[in-house]
Amino acid sequence: MRQTARFWRSREGALVLPAFVFYLLVYVYPLGKMAGWSFYDGGFTLKFWRELAGEPVYFKALSNTLEISVLVTAITLLLGYPLAYLMTTTTARARRVLTVLLLIPFWTSVLVRTFAWLVILGRNGLVNNTLVALGLAAEPQKLLFNMIGVQVGMVQVLLPFMVFPLYAVMSRIDLNVIRVARSLGAPPHRVFLHVFLPLSLPGVTAGSVIVFLLAVGFYVTPALLGGPGQITLATMIDMMITTFLNFGFAATLGLLLLAVVAGIFALVSALMGMNRIVGGGGA
Amino acid sequence: MSGARIALWVLASMLMIFLVAPIAIIAITSFNGTPYMEFPPKSLSLRWYVNFFTSPQWYQTAITSLKVAIPTTIAATALGASAAIGIVRGSFPGRRALEAFFVSPMVVPIVVIALGFYFLFSGYKLLDTPLALFLGHTVIATPLVIVMVRAALQTANPAMEFAARSLGAGFWQALWYVTLPSVRAAMGSAAAFAFLISFDDVVIAIFVAGPDSTTLPKRMWETIRFEIDPTLTAIASLLTLVAVVVLVTGELLRRADPTERAE
Amino acid sequence: MKRREVLKSAGIVTAAALTGPFFHIRPARADKGELVVVSWGGDYDTALREYVCSAFEKATGYTVKLDAPPETAKVKAMVQSGKVSWDVIMTDAPAVAAMLKDSLLEPIDYSAVDKAKLAKVPKELQQPYALGQRIYSFNIVYNSKLMPKAKHTHTWAEVWDGKNFPGGRTFNFQGGTAPQLEAALLADGVPMDKLYPLDIERAWKMMDKLRPLVTKWYTSHAQAIQLLSAGEVAVGNTIGSRGIAAKKQGAPIDVDYNQGKLASDNWCLVKGVRDRKIAMEFINFALDPKLQALIAQKVPYGPSNSGAFEFLSAAEAADLATSPENIKNQFWWNTEWWSTPGPDGKTPRESQGERFAKWMVMN
């Protein structure tokens, strides 16, 4: 306790103070205000929460949100792991090229990329035209306004978020351990399964948690590329504000989403240790 | 190369195409002569670019975005860098918790943060002002700055600072002449990211901005939903160009920095 | 020395950049002669600016700033926060009803509008808080390549028939427009003059039948037109005028006015409008028959002032929803029924809108 107080009075503390105060005013306070709105309607009330509990619709929206997020996490993991592995085990030059290519979409706005998919995945878009021309499909496939469109759009945005943590951990794996295992006669696939894979797990966890949490908060992509089965909690919040003008209920849904995210984060960090995720391996 | 290796490279190439191609396709479509966004374009023209630069509803919003992004970059970098230095150099129990607190906005769903801002700013009649956008963007940009500067600080050598102090330098002098230069590259990158985060933000703008403070992404979002305009393809290409320029500049500056260790 | 100079100027630039947004002072409106008019954007706004705004600006010396779209949530936030930056809005009847419920509007000053003009505007469009500007209808709009004119869906029943008329459908969702229950009932065989009061349960049964046929539920009419011209869907329920406008620009779209639902977009005054006199003057300008005709020639919406038809050719009139030929096969959207609160205090627009959202999510 005293050490903490001493920190805040020290000069290091002075460096941290401006950001801390800023956060309190512009980040914590508004969230608190939002939480307040969820219980206020002329006086303290639980009516929004009662309504939330009584209507299956909102839980369907929540389950849509979770379904999308789980699927995105799985796909980015499946695709990102081999990619990160390749980055770890290749030449520095090839790695640089891959990194730059990974960063380019990373820094184009979500709106731009989602819009691109709207144009490309349409019935008369590039993908369908190619599929039909090559004879791979009898007629244009429905690639938009369903889970396929949403997954394609979101995986493209979130793949780098899976690859970079994976790479960060993989690149720190001591290659000597691998070498020893090989020299002891273990075949490559066993080395991979029993040595490399377990050592890369912190990266898997970090990447998965990041991707999942980001996916849960996605608003733009499911709204533009998805159909009714992909109506997320974020979309419902927007609907509450713009269509139904029900601010109290919007706040309630916001609080629900926040609670879900906080819960998942707490669960994972309790199981895995917060260091792995926040610290990224630093001392 | 073994079969497995080849398979890996094939997968990697396909993924790279997957990541980059859509943007390239939009760039090509932006030169389409007709307003039907067909690919490949049947005729070429620069009309959508011209439209962007000559329509107030577009270039005004770009200016607004800049007006918000530049102060955000400065504020986020300043706040974030100082906080990162303070956290890394200070030591006390609960440091991890403070770190987690500072990074938490990256984890909270952006729509929840935006909603919080909505309630905050409406209470102070600040909705639909560039000031509100500046505040909001700074909150979401600062965590990334903290993460990046912190990472750089942890790999930098604290011994140099220690040496400077023992040679008689004061706290602030050591900070300015020793610590900051060592994280200059990271700060530069962080500043670039902060700029892009603010410039490209759409969710916070949807909730907080209005006719007096419409940013470019907000106008784009409205256009996609209400009145689809092929000018979007030109704008999308320009935004990508801006991002690439910012990235490349950042990378070149980093290479030119003598304190940056060679790869 | 030099470094300090550089740092100093950098500091000044930084200070300027940081404080920039806060000192961006907007000129006070009304005193400096600016009027903010909010409409739906797109081609109509372009025509509005070209004819009405320029005439108004020339006559009064005020500048008109056009904005879009007229979101009710924005109006609510503005009025409640006291920072009203919109003066005149043009929006549809459901939005007007929603805004009235929250007391967000001021009454129309009918004494400020020329009697001659009002005489030619339908009585239904002269409400205390809303004055009609343009008339359109929700029609069967289809892609003429996927559905040739000879064999297209001529009735809502045929739109519901996915077997004989294959192809994706698009209907509206979100944006405050309640579900198209009238179209559903017409598809089930209810005669046009016996629609209201709506048999809600019967309508929803038909909506259930429609659901599998819908490729995409559109969130804006522009999106519907985009889906239709790109061939993503074969037919949709959207605004015929927009379909005609797209057709004129070369899109493979056509409109069937049979069984259309007529509606109007109306002028309203936001509560707290700074200069009511000037705002009403603008509305008066907008109702001019010649100007309305000029707009209608560019953008095929029906003018609220039927005097405009004197300035239109027969061909131009035929495209409009309110031409004699087209209007006889359509019915008026009974916005009164939709805005009358039921026993639970909710209007059908609210309760059906909620039911629609829930119906959509629980698919």
Image (cartoon, rainbow, N blue to C red):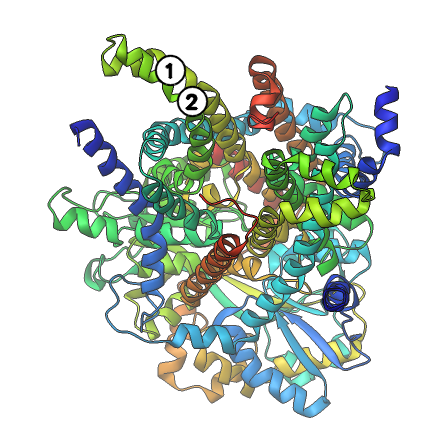
Q: Identify which residue is drawn at 63% across, 45% down.
A: B182
Closer to the camera in the image, A48 or A91: A91
Q: Residues within 10 Å of mark 1 (few under 14, many from 20)?
A: few
Question: In the depicted view, which residue is nearer to us: A129 or B152?
Answer: B152
* Residue wearing tag 1: A177
Vertical order, B29 against B158 (above or below):
below
Q: Do we see residue C42 in this rendering? A: yes
Residue B128 x/y as whole percent: 71, 58
Disc ID at residue A173: 2
Task: Write down the chain letter for disc 2.
Answer: A
Looking at this view, is C6 or C36 the one in front? Answer: C6
**Residue C189 in view, yes or no:** no
Q: What amino acid type is highlighted by mark number 1?
A: Val
Residue C35 figure quarter: bottom right
Q: Quadrant of the C terminus of chain C?
A: top left
Tell me where residue C282 appears, x and y as whole percent. Answer: 68, 80
Q: Chain of mark 1?
A: A
For mark 1, give the secondary structure: helix
**Image x and y of residue A281, in percent:** 55, 25
Q: How many marks?
A: 2
Kindly report the distance in space between the C-alpha atoms of the residues bearing marks 1 and 2: 8 Å
Residue under the point 61% across and 21% down: A274
Crowding near the residue tagged with mark 2, few <14, some 14–19, many ≥20 C-alpha atoms within 10 Å? some
Q: Residue furthest front?
A: B167
| Image quadrant assignment for residue C116 | bottom right
User: What secondary structure is marked by label 2?
Assistant: loop
Confirm or deny contact between disc 1 and disc 2 (CB under 8 A). yes
Seen in the image, is A128 located left or right of residue B235? left
Q: Is residue B16 above or below residue A216?
A: below
- Residue B125 at what x, y percent from top left? 80, 55
Q: To which quarter of the image does residue B40 belong?
A: bottom left
Task: Decide if residue A139 is on the left or right side of residue B100.
Answer: left
